[in-house]
Image (spheres, rainbow, N blue to C red):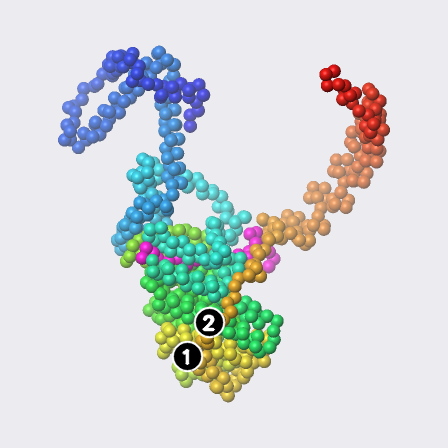
Amino acid sequence: MASFTSEQCKVFEEFKAYDWEKDKVFQAGVANILKAMAKPTPTKAASPSPHDADYDEFRHGQQQEELLQVLRAKHFYFNKFKEPFSLDEYLAYELEEDKKEQEQRFERVEVYDFDNDERYLQGLPNIIQGWVNKQLNDGKNGKLWDKARLDLEYTKTKAVYYSSCIEKVDVGAYMLWKHDKESKEVSVCPFANLWQNKGKADLGPQLISDDFLCVDVPKSTGGYTIAWASPATRNLLTAARLTQLSKALDDAGNDDNVTSLFLTATVADTASPFDMGSPDKQIETKDTKTISQGVAYDATYRHVRGKGDDKRSHDDAVKAVDHLNNVYTRQLIQQLLTSKARAKPTVAYLNGSLPLHVAPLMLWPGYLRVATEHALIPCHVTLGHAPAPPLLLYTLCQQRMAARKPVPGGYFAFLALAPPELARLRAPELLRIGLVDVFVPENQLNDVILHTKRMAFCPEPNTSMAVQMILSMFSSYPGPERVSTWQNAIEQVFGDVHQPEVSFATVLGRLEQLDNAWSKQILEHWATLPPVLLKAIFKATQQVQEKSPSEILALEEGINRAWRQSADYQQFCDGKRDWQSSLDADDDAELVNAYFEARAAEPSDDTHAFEYEISSSDVIEAPTPAMVCPVTGQASSADAKCPVTGQSNVAAKCPVTGQSNADAKCPVTGQSSSEAKCPVTGQNNADAKCPVSGQSSADANKCPVTGQSNSGAKCPVTGQTSATGTCPAADKPKDA
């Protein structure tokens, strides 16, 4: 880039601003100047006629030559009568100024608020519709779009609109400028992601709400976003929050401008930003991201029961839990079966762990479900206030997978009774059994959300196709799944449980006969659970084959309600484990059948039931990360060691002299801290004196002229002390 002096710039600007129209001398002589400067035109063939194909090119070249001649004439005149300057330097200056102005226009394109421009938003659906149609045609020829192509089309669309409706811009030059700018912003270091940001994807600003939900309604048409946005409370689902979520789903379903829904959550992350583990320990997966801690059953029960240990306080707490379960099941899950929102494409993003009992809210089979490496669903049977597995979710997923890649026989029956070690399902397993549809790495999640929302502008009937086009672009391989690892054993033990003649005792006998590590894990887990509840869940898995979705949902609710009415539940709430019956008992049919009686599935009158509300006790403060070495990942502690010398804080020595803190000496003079002396005067701390005045530290508070100390100091002119003296000038009259 050329550099110009301030004087040159001043002359150039004067030349640009000069009023040539009012200069009569220039106007009178410009024709003669042009004639004198005109170059002889070489003989050419006849000029093209207006009907020739290259006439426009010829005419444009002729006009450019005339403009250049006028500029030369102006320069000739200004150079002779005003200020002399170089025409070539002026042209370079003009080119530089044009580039600056052009870049400023490009920057204005970058910061323009397209999302709030109604004209732009109204025209976007038709453009995206054209992209989808082109993708469908290109896909037949194997030419599928990728992220770079989609970004290019979006950038071009914005630039064309801006140039047409806002401010004239060279679209081609803008595209090149943006490409060069983005290329420069990419780090050239291949290890740029391995230091402070190792293992941490930048998800940008996270949505936080005091009211649990953050809802983004489209301004004209497009996607409707519902975000669980209370990570401080681990997105705990109270009755009020469930009602709020139900209303948001209804609003989206009833809004004709909404083409699709997006369900996401701000996860609570407990990971330290520098937690890299120890090189001496086995590598283990750390689950630090939590989407939600589930429905507030436990908080409701504990709040209502309080410190009471009598049956009445227990019954009151059960009534409150029944009411909360009724809100969740009858209001929200039933809504997923009948809501108008089901007809609209819905994308759910799973970027953390989610309790099994609320999995249907994010993993409903009608959704397009996207999982990252942090996705985790603990599907094992566990005790709680609502221990029934999501049988409806399992059944619908099994039906969907039957036409694609069938799930191993009896797998969902196994999952309903499995121990934690075998049923903590991550993205590979969730994909295999149909609980999620797409895997994307967390570091690409922001791009996926951004592009799917953009494509949601595509009108029906191609909205779903447009969104799926984005998901297919980002879809990645999640790694090997573990479902097939135990497939043979699962099919051998649980493969025929849907047949009425197969009983719980039959499955129990098969596990005992198998007698391997897999079967022993299951039996050991069963030994900790109420046998009657296990047998009821087993019986429920046999009955779902012949029931409708609504009946399966009622079956789930009935098992949970009957469990809360049982003596085993009272034992669980009291912290005891004196269960009814045993695993191998055959005389507990009446207790098991009680879980399926009609009264168990019918909710009681809970109009005035207690509803738990979020309080300060539910707010979980994020842990403050310890100071950690960015190289080794070691936290600050007494036994932390240097990765170079292997020394700890206690045994630390200087790597140059080998000295420790206790015996440290100056490497130049050999003196220790106790015998240190000034290398100039040879004095130590005890007898140190100023080399100029000769004063010691004890004499340092004396005036070097009079020798007086602070306590007895007197003015050398008047002899007054600071206690009694007054300034002689202050006693003079004002007119003196």
Residue 495 at x, y = what percent?
Answer: 41, 77
Q: Which mark is residue 542?
A: 1
Quarter of the C terminus within the rendering: top right
Q: CA distance from mark 1 to mark 2?
A: 34 Å
Vertical comparison of 485 with 493: above or below: above
- In the image: residue 255, left or right of residue 195: left
- In the image: residue 198, left or right of residue 166: right
Report the residue at 27% width, 22% height from top. Answer: 67
Determine the secondary structure under disc 2: loop
- In the image: residue 343, left or right of residue 682: left
Report the residue at 78% width, 23% height from top. Answer: 727
Q: Residues within 10 Å of mark 2 (few under 14, many from 20)?
A: few
Vertical comparison of 622 with 588: above or below: above
Q: Which mark is residue 394?
A: none
Report the residue at 31% width, 14% height from top. Answer: 23
Vertical comparison of 495 with 283: above or below: below
Q: Amino acid at mark 2?
A: Thr
Residue 72 lies in quadrant: top left
Residue 651 at x, y = what percent?
Answer: 72, 50
Taking the magenta stretch, the answer to whether it contains residue 483 is no
Asked whether residue 66 is in view, the answer is yes
Q: Identify the magenta region.
A: 256-282
Q: Amino acid at mark 1?
A: Gln
- Residue under numbered circle 2: 607
Residue 484 lies in quadrant: bottom left
Residue 290 at x, y = what percent?
Answer: 51, 60
Seen from the viewer's position, the closer of residues 79 and 45 is: 79
